[in-house]
Amino acid sequence: MPEGTGFDPARLRDRFAGRRVLLTGHSGFKGGWLALWLKQLGAHVTGISLPPATTPSLHDVLGLGRLIDGRFGDIRDEADYARALDGLDADLVIHMAANAIVRQCHQSPVEAYRTNVVGTAVVLDAARAMPSLKGIVVVTSDKCYENHEWPWGYRESDALGGKDPYSSSKAGTELVASAFRRSYFAAPGAPLLATVRAGNVFGGGDWAADRLIPDIVRATLAGSPTLIRNPNSTRPWQHVLEPLSGYLMVADALLAGRAGAATAWNFGPDADGTVDVARMTGLMAEAWGPGGPTFHYGPGGDSREAGLLALDSAKARAELGWRPRLALPQALDMTVDWYRRWASGATDMTEFTLAQIDAFAGGSAADGGASAVSLPDGGLQQCA
């Protein structure tokens, strides 16, 4: 493993402290967690996105509008995005704004391509005008691969594709990023551009429709069973902080001028994190305990969804020193704890979310990331 690689919170603080970071999609689930983490690392964060798509939203629960320079703008519209950007210069751009729900993309395919493909081109074209820019991280998805339902994980060198609008629009995002990398960011000294791909993520603060964990949480808090449509579908599941740690490690390498990092990266769980939906529902019930979720099964599967999908993250392990830090049951314990705290109304969720980030970053890969941290109520919580 090259010198200076591996997850190192102290190095990340040194790298990001005082850096100007533009984060698109900050009002979303993954974007909200990353915005808070970047703020904790000392970065000056500017977010551009559409207003939150759900009520409640992580953006509002965390009070991100008070913590970062949050702006609302539409990446699908060059003029509106330029207005939101307002001449901003950044050291790093992290592009997360996207249509991230498979069923929504199937229902509105033109909007899927307009957001995921055209929107990426708008963001990258505007980034070309930033004189201080050192690096760009474009976030796509594990579903950007042409899925053959193989039992082994896809590598970064495997073919892009997709039989549905969501998957193919994510492949399109990758193609746009590759074209910009080779056309505009290839000269010596030019900003370095990487793409990052992750699987099904979960964690506190996700209220999106048609996602398994948010669906379970909504139904359980309402005292209703959760409808399960695809119990046999297998996915790579991981807590949201797992891939975000990888994104930060890639950004760290780009800011350090490591040209070899300007490529595609997979961030997926270990083999025990790639399980079917039926197993995930069982683990979620165990994490919740008494009074937890119940389930009933709807008619048939969904042909738009892949039956089997896994990622091979060997490259990130070998070249970045990245590896998952939480076992799947630990990640679900963290998630259930977050939602219970929020539902109680008695916890400062910004401080609690920061405490979960601290616990994740402070734990070693060897012990699964477990780390006791002081929570806002003064108690001790084992966050893994």
Image (spheres, grey):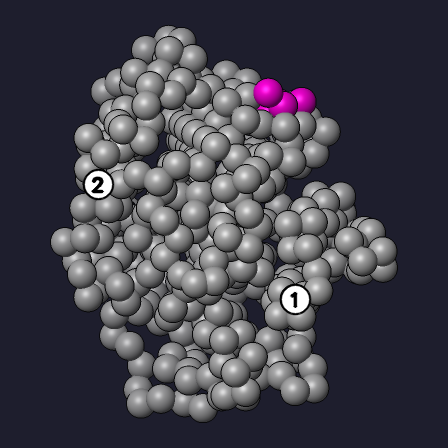
Q: Which mark is residue 345?
A: 1
- The quarter holding residue 47 reads top left
Tell me the magenta residue range: 14-18
| Front residue of this view, candidates 282 and 356 | 356
Q: Quadrant of residue 137?
A: top left
In this image, 265 relative to 243: left or right? left
* Residue 325 highlighted magenta (yes or no): no
Q: Look at 43% across and 13% down and name the residue there.
A: 132
Residue 171: give x, y in percent of width and height.
Answer: 26, 46
Instruction: Pick out the residue farthest to the top.
Output: 188
Please state the horizontal and vertical placement of residue 164, each as a whole percent of the image.
21, 61
Q: Are marks 1 and 2 in contact (CB under 8 Å)?
A: no
Question: Residue at the spot x=76%, y=43% of the render?
Answer: 362
Question: Which type of secondary structure does the marked residue at label 1 adopt?
Answer: loop
Q: Amino acid at mark 1?
A: Gly
> In the rendered view, does 217 fall on the left or right side of 296?
right
Quadrant the C terminus occupies: bottom right
For the point 23% across and 34% down, the residue is 80
Q: Residue furthest left?
A: 110
Instruction: Please tell me whether residue 9 is drawn above or below residue 110 in the rendered image.
Output: above
Local packing at callout 2 (Cα closer than 10 Å; few below 14, some 14-19, many 20+) is: many
Q: Is residue 173 above or below residue 329?
A: above
Could you tell me how far apart the alpha carbons at marks 1 and 2 are, in whole angstroms?
37 Å
Task: Tell me which numbered mark, 1 or 2, is placed earlier along the sequence.
Answer: 2
Depth check, front residue: 179 or 123? 123
Q: Secondary structure at mark 2?
A: loop
Q: Nearer the viewer, residue 188 or 122?
A: 122
Residue 191, image x, y percentages: 39, 17
Mark 2 — residue?
Answer: 76
